[in-house]
Image: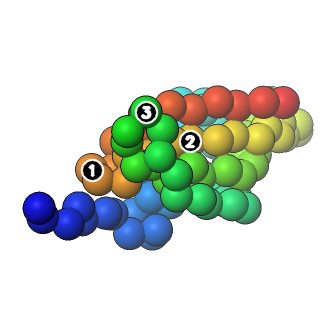
Amino acid sequence: MAEKVLISLDEAHAAAEKFLGGQVKNLKKTAIVKVKLSTIGGITVYEVEGTIDFSKSFFRTGHSSFKVQINAGDGAVVGYETTG
């Protein structure tokens, strides 16, 4: 049986940041604080966690936490959540 090839940690970071950029209007900054490799429902995923800053108005910035699950085989987003 052939061994599965996983995307790199840097590719998982980039996939999460690209996804967040498409989901969060006026995204200013993304800070990744934790990444772990796990298995969910038979799929190996990177769980990427961190914080985002975004413009709420000209003078105000909003902050939120996020968790994005990236398929470790192909880099597709399989789940996400934001809080705050």
Question: Disc 3 or disc 2, which is closer to the eye?
Answer: 3
User: What is the secondary structure assignment of the residue under circle 1?
Assistant: loop
What amino acid is labelled 1 in the image? Answer: Asp
Q: Earlier in the sequence, mark 2 or mark 1?
A: 2
Q: CA distance from mark 1 to mark 3?
A: 16 Å
- Please tell me the numbered disc located at residue 68: 2
What amino acid is labelled 3 in the image? Answer: Gly
Q: Is residue 16 left or right of residue 48?
A: left
Q: Is residue 83 left or right of residue 69?
A: right
User: What is the secondary structure assignment of the residue under circle 3?
Assistant: loop
Front in this rendered view, residue 48 or 53? 48
Q: Earlier in the sequence, mark 3 or mark 2?
A: 3
Find the residue positioned furthest to the front: 1
Residue 57, position as x, y percentages in the image: 80, 30
Q: Check disc 2: other Cα within 10 Å, few if <14, some if 14-19, many if 20+.
A: many
Q: Check disc 3: other Cα within 10 Å, few if <14, some if 14-19, many if 20+.
A: few
Find the residue positioned furthest to the right: 60
Find the residue positioned furthest to the left: 1
Q: For mark 1, what is the residue?
A: 74
Q: In the image, what residue occupies the spot 59% across and 59% down?
A: 36
- Please tell me the numbered disc located at residue 41: 3
Q: Check disc 1: other Cα within 10 Å, few if <14, some if 14-19, many if 20+.
A: few
Q: CA distance from mark 2 to mark 1?
A: 14 Å
Q: For the N terminus, which image quadrant?
A: bottom left
- Please tell me the numbered disc located at residue 63: none
